[in-house]
Structures are given as C-alpha cells and as structure tokens.
Amino acid sequence: MSSIDLTYHFLIAMPNMVDPYFARTLTLVCEHSAQGALGIVVNRPLDMTLQTLFERLSLSMRNTELADAPIYFGGPVQTDRGFVLHMPPGHWQSTLRVRDRLGLTTSRDVLEAVGRGEGPEKMLVSLGYAGWAAGQLEHELKQNAWLTVEAQEAIIFDLPAEERLPAALELLGLDYARLADVAGHA
C-alpha cells in the first residue's frame, strides 16, 4: 500500500470488528507515519469522572463545572496513563500537535491548569491510547476493519459520546445500522 497519512482522521470500526477494545468505536488518529500510528478512542466513556481522577492524582479542582466530565477509554495501551485531547493545542510540557488544531498532552501541567480553571477551551481526557506498529494500520485497512474520514472537532467535543460514531458515519453519507458486516473486494 502506498504511504498514507491518516493523522487527523477518524477510524470508524466496521460492524465485523470483533476485537472487544475496538468494536463500535470511533478513534481519532493523532499521529500516523511510517513508524506506526497513535490514536484515541473518543466514544467510550468509562465509569469515572474528572473529579474522581483528580482525587486519585491528588490534584485540586476549583473549576467544579468540569467535575462530572467523563473520563474515556482511549485504547488498550498504557491504560494507567492519562491523555488529554484538547483545543487549542496550547503550550504544555509534553504535547503532540495534531495538525495545528488539537493537542494531545500527557504531562500533568495541563490537568493542573484545568484544576485552576485555566485549561484548554475544549478537552477530552482518556486513560490509554490505541497504537499500531509500522504497517499494522494499513494492513487492517486492507482487511476492511475500518472506514476513514477526516475528523471534525465538533464531533469530538460538542456531541455526547453515543452520538459521535453515527455523526462520523454521516460525514460519509452512511448509517451504521445499514453497514454490512462482511466486505467484498473488487
């Protein structure tokens, strides 16, 4: 497969996805290169709030508006580590810029700023991330495991979690209920 860059694209799990980590998921690809890919699942909230996470990290939260914000399952890799997907990218200690629109930050300083009410305008906090080795994502695409479409911040930050996957499919003019769970090859 020729080299493709799916950075800032959604991966939409096809109905035939049997991997329990990714079935019915919408994943934002934050980085894609010849070395592999990194993404964050954006539609699978955990049974944990931002307040609970702050308590576990011994952080104070003055901005109680965000206390009930859900924490998300970002993927099966490093599930004990937090990842903050946010906009604007800002200037944090450890941030991967995603096409100059978003930031994916792993340093504690972004959470400290959130606690003070000085954090990013919009954010999604996850535990873990999705990772693919070199060529692995391309192989999965050939196997029809995923559909891809360019990402939209509004889907990530403005819609409830359960509406994100259908909204991403609508960008392609598709309805999840109508997708076949088998694929053909021309």
Image (cartoon, rainbow, N blue to C red):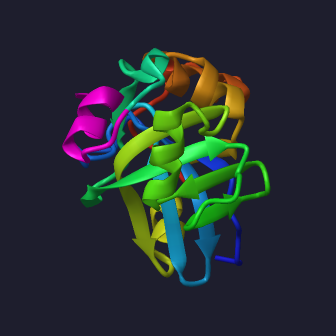
Horizontal arrangement in the rendering, residue 21 relative to residue 148 (left or right): left
Please state the horizontal and vertical placement of residue 115, each as a whole percent of the image. Answer: 46, 35
| Residue at position x 49%, y 81% in the image | 134
Image side of residue 127 versus residue 180, left or right: left
Q: Quadrant of residue 93?
A: bottom right
The quarter of the image holding the N terminus is: bottom right
Placement of 87 over or under 92, stated as above or below: above
Q: Quadrant of residue 24?
A: top left
Tell me which residue sits at (69%, 34%) in the image: 153
Q: Residue 117's spot in the image, x, y percent?
A: 56, 31
Q: Position of residue 12 (x, y in %)?
A: 51, 40
Which residues make up the magenta segment?
Answer: 45-60
**Furthest residue in direction right, as rendered:** 100
- Please tell me whether residue 48 belongs to the stretch shown in magenta: yes
Residue 134 in sight from this viewpoint: yes
Quick check: 12 above or below 3? above
- Residue closer to the observer: 14 or 27: 27
Residue for point 70% across, 70% down? 4
Tell me, yes or no, whether the highlighted magenta stretch contains residue 172. no
Quarter of the figure that contains the C terminus:
bottom right
Measured as percent of width and height from the top left, residue 17 is found at: 33, 44
Q: Classify residue 168 by image quadrant.
A: top right
